[in-house]
Image (cartoon, rainbow, N blue to C red):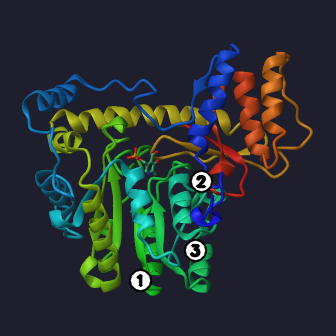
């Protein structure tokens, strides 16, 4: 096989959130009872979909014409509904034309980076939701470019680091923000968002703001969608229903584009995203049809509030327990459903051993950790899984040198 068919090395596109499941399954076969805290799927975690929501979906499936293709960018009525929601805030104003649907936000992320010029880089947070960094790195055929999130400051972006990286790397064309953040659960205050917008404006960059968790903020915190703050900066907001409704199996997400007309290069880029969507035909129709009906249902805000208070309770319990553990750093989380637990420098050492006797389990786990390149936090995660059944994800797989783990 010719060697030029791939431009990133095998194994470089990692998604540990799912890779760890294969190991958990092997351990299950050896009798280990697992508790899967690795993936942000509320439905898999037992979230009950309310009857009124199921009835909307069933009604559409029975009576409606959601069985055909829809428009390239998505159903017009849904894009109208979503554009009005944004416009009602009285800041950025968009039309349905500024919205493009995808088969899940993960799909949108791959397409959005995939259509950038190879030499144009988007700087993203570290740690980051790995789909972003691996998608961005794959398009460039290089390692991701990152700015630091600071565990000593609520995992907020280190703005000096961001500013310096942007200043000295002319390849950077855009900045990615994830707010509320995965994997840290941080919710960014308005002042941080404004500073990032100011950096984008100063260096003539566009913004990508992943806002899939925007309506899952708790602990009395508040944040703003980026559309409220961008002014004339070109930006893309990424949204979806996997977490909020929650309906991850629908594979339905969308982007909203702001200020495309303000910059001809950005406009061409957005057009290339639309063109590629046309080649693909369109995205899943039924969930698009359901969105306005679900989001405008009188029970919807009640249901969201109830879930948020549950997430708040769980996250505060996790925080109270973990902050007492020696050797780790945790922050209270205020949104989404993740917590990043960071190890202090000398918490993990090479001489730690697996605290169990089962020979088969030992053989499996020791075989895994003896492979080259296994980080100390990955080893910790395997040991934790084998000895307690708790399945979490090593922090190092979220593109950070910081060792630790992410728990849902
Ligand atoms: N963006 C973030 C920050 C996420 O956490 C996730 C899923 O975990 C996604 C995007 C992908 O969502 P979807 O299920 O719509 O592909």
Q: Visible in this render: residue 129? A: no
Tell whether 386 sits left or right of 321. right
**Residue at image x 66%, y 59%?**
9
Q: For marks 1 and 3, give the CA distance.
A: 13 Å
**Residue at image x 23%, y 61%?**
99
Q: For marks 2 and 3, give the CA distance.
A: 24 Å
Tell whether 356 sits left or right of 142. right
Q: Residue furthest front?
A: 1
**Image depth: mark 2 or mark 3 in front:** 2
**Residue at image x 57%, y 35%?**
38
Residue 13, numbered circle: 2
Which one is in front, 338 or 194?
Answer: 338
Pointer 1 with pointer 3, Cβ within 8 A: no
Task: Name the element at disc 2.
Answer: loop
Percent coordinates x, y for residue 385 in the rendering: 70, 28
Residue 162, numbered circle: 3
Q: For marks 2 and 1, give the CA distance.
A: 31 Å
Task: Name the element at disc 1.
Answer: helix
**Residue at image x 42%, y 31%?**
310
Of pointers 1 and 3, the one earlier in the residue sequence: 3
Percent coordinates x, y for residue 32 in the rendering: 68, 17
Residue under label 1, please give it.
Answer: 201
**Image depth: mark 2 or mark 1 in front:** 2
Which one is in front, 294 or 68?
Answer: 68
Q: Visible in this render: residue 334? A: yes
Percent coordinates x, y for residue 115 in the rendering: 41, 69
């Amino acid at each position: 096989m010719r060697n030029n068919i791939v431009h990133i090395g095998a194994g470089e596109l990692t998604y540990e959130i799912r890779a760890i499941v294969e190991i958990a399954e092997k351990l299950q076969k050896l009798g280990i009872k697992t508790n899967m805290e690795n993936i942000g799927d509320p439905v898999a975690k037992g979230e009950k979909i309310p009857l009124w929501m199921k009835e909307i979906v069933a009604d559409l499936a029975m009576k409606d014409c959601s069985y055909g293709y829809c428009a390239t960018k998505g159903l017009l009525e849904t894009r109208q509904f979503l554009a009005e929601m944004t416009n009602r805030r009285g800041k950025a104003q968009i039309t349905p034309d500024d919205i493009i649907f995808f088969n899940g936000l993960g799909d949108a992320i791959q397409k959005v980076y995939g259509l950038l010029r190879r030499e144009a880089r988007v700087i993203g947070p570290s740690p980051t939701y790995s789909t972003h960094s691996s998608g961005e790195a794959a398009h460039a055929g290089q390692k991701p470019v990152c700015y630091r999130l600071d565990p000593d400051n609520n995992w907020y972006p280190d703005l000096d680091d961001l500013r310096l990286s942007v200043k000295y790397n002319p390849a950077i064309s855009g900045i990615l923000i994830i707010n509320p953040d995965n994997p840290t659960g941080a919710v960014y205050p308005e002042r941080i968002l404004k500073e990032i917008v100011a950096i984008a404006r100063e260096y003539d960059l566009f913004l990508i703001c992943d806002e899939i968790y925007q309506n899952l903020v708790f602990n009395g915190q508040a944040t703003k969608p980026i559309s409220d703050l961008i002014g004339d900066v070109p930006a893309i907001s990424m949204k979806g229903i996997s977490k909020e409704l929650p309906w991850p199996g629908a594979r339905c997400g969308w982007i909203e584009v702001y200020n495309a007309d303000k910059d001809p290069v950005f406009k061409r880029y957005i057009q290339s995203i639309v063109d590629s969507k046309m080649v693909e035909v369109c995205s899943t129709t039924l969930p698009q049809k359901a969105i306005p009906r679900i989001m405008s249902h009188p029970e919807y805000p009640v249901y969201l509030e109830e879930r948020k208070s549950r997430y708040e309770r769980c996250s505060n319990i996790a925080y109270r327990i973990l902050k007492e553990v020696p050797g780790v750093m945790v922050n209270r989380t205020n949104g989404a459903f993740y917590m990043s637990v960071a190890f202090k420098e000398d918490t993990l050492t090479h001489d730690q051993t697996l605290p169990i006797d089962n020979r088969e389990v030992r053989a499996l786990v020791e075989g895994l950790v003896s492979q080259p390149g296994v980080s100390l936090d990955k080893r910790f995660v395997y040991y934790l899984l084998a000895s307690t059944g708790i399945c979490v994800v090593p922090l190092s797989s979220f593109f950070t040198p910081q060792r630790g783990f992410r728990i849902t």
